Each structure stands twice: as structure tokens, then as C-alpha cells.
Image: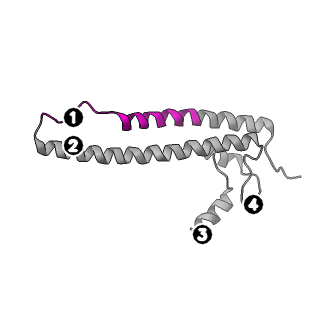
Amino acid sequence: MEKRHYSDVELDEFRRVITEKLDLSLRDYEVLKASLMNTDNNRAEDTAPTYKVLEEGANTLSKEETTRLAQRQMKFIQSLQAALVRIENKTYGVCRECGELIPKERLNAVPHATLCIKCKEAQNKRK
């Protein structure tokens, strides 16, 4: 008989891994958010106007990149939180396309995965 879901012990292992990744991701997000909120005291007010314009341009680019990183980090956090909900519902590790069990190796590499490799590859081909 083929397994259709992971055991409670296996789900607890996954929960531990995901919780660790979630804690780290939340800390990273807070660092990114703080850097966006930070009013840099090392400004160029007392230097040449040309340098000030260049610095402001670099700051804008840096803020845009930091904003993108923060958005990406938040998406990852939400995916990990959704994985924890699937663990509670005992649906974690089940491919949402074919219903087969996603291999542990894949879940260890991508703990928020909702598709097995075969279905993920098929999805990528459709894009």
C-alpha cells in the first residue's frame, strides 16, 4: 500500500525545519525593513552638489533593491507559514496537482513546495 501522507513524527520533523527557516527569515525581513526605515546620518549635505546628486541616486537604487528583497522575503515567509498550516491539516507534502507524496529530499530542499518535481516541471513547460 502506497503512503498518501506523512506520519505525525515526520510532520514534526518538517515543522521543526520550517520553524527554524521561518525564524531566520523573519529576522532577515526585519533587517531589510529597518534598513528601509533608516534615515542615514552619513549624508552629503556638506559636500559638493554633484556628489550629493550621485549619492541620492545610489540611495534610490539601493532602496528599490532593498524593497524588492523585502517583498521577496515576505513572500517566502508567507509560503513557510502556509506550509505550517498544511502540516496542521496533515496535507503537507502532498502534491496539489497529482495527489502523490512529494519526496522528502524535495521538501528538505524546498520546505514550502506544493508540487512534486514532475508536476513542477510540467507547470514550468506551460509558462
For marks 4 and 2 on the same chain, the one whose residue lies earlier in the sequence: 2
The quarter in which the C terminus is drawn is bottom right
Nearer the camera: disc 2 or disc 3: 2
Q: Position of residue 56 (x, y in %)?
A: 23, 44
Label 2 crowd bin: few (<14), some (14–19), many (20+), radius 10 Å: some
- Left or right of 5: which side holds 125? left
Q: Which residue is mark 2?
A: 55
Q: Which residue is mark 3?
A: 126
Q: Which mark's residue is nearer the viewer, 4 or 1?
A: 1
As drawn, the residue found furthest toward the top would be 41
The residue where tag 1 is placed is 43
Q: Nearer the viewer, residue 47 or 114?
A: 47
Is residue 104 one of those drawn in magenta? no
Residue assigned mark 4: 98
Between the residue at mark 4 and the residue at mark 1, the CA separation in whole angstroms equals 56 Å
Hey, what amino acid is under mark 1? Arg
Instruction: State the separation of the CA atoms marked 2 and 3.
Output: 43 Å
Q: Secondary structure at mark 4?
A: loop
Q: Residue furthest bottom?
A: 126
Mark closer to the chain start, 3 or 1: 1
- Marks 2 and 1: in contact by CB < 8 Å? yes
Q: Earlier in the sequence, mark 2 or mark 3?
A: 2
Residue 52 at x, y = what percent?
17, 42
Label pair 4/2, CB-CB below 8 angstroms:
no
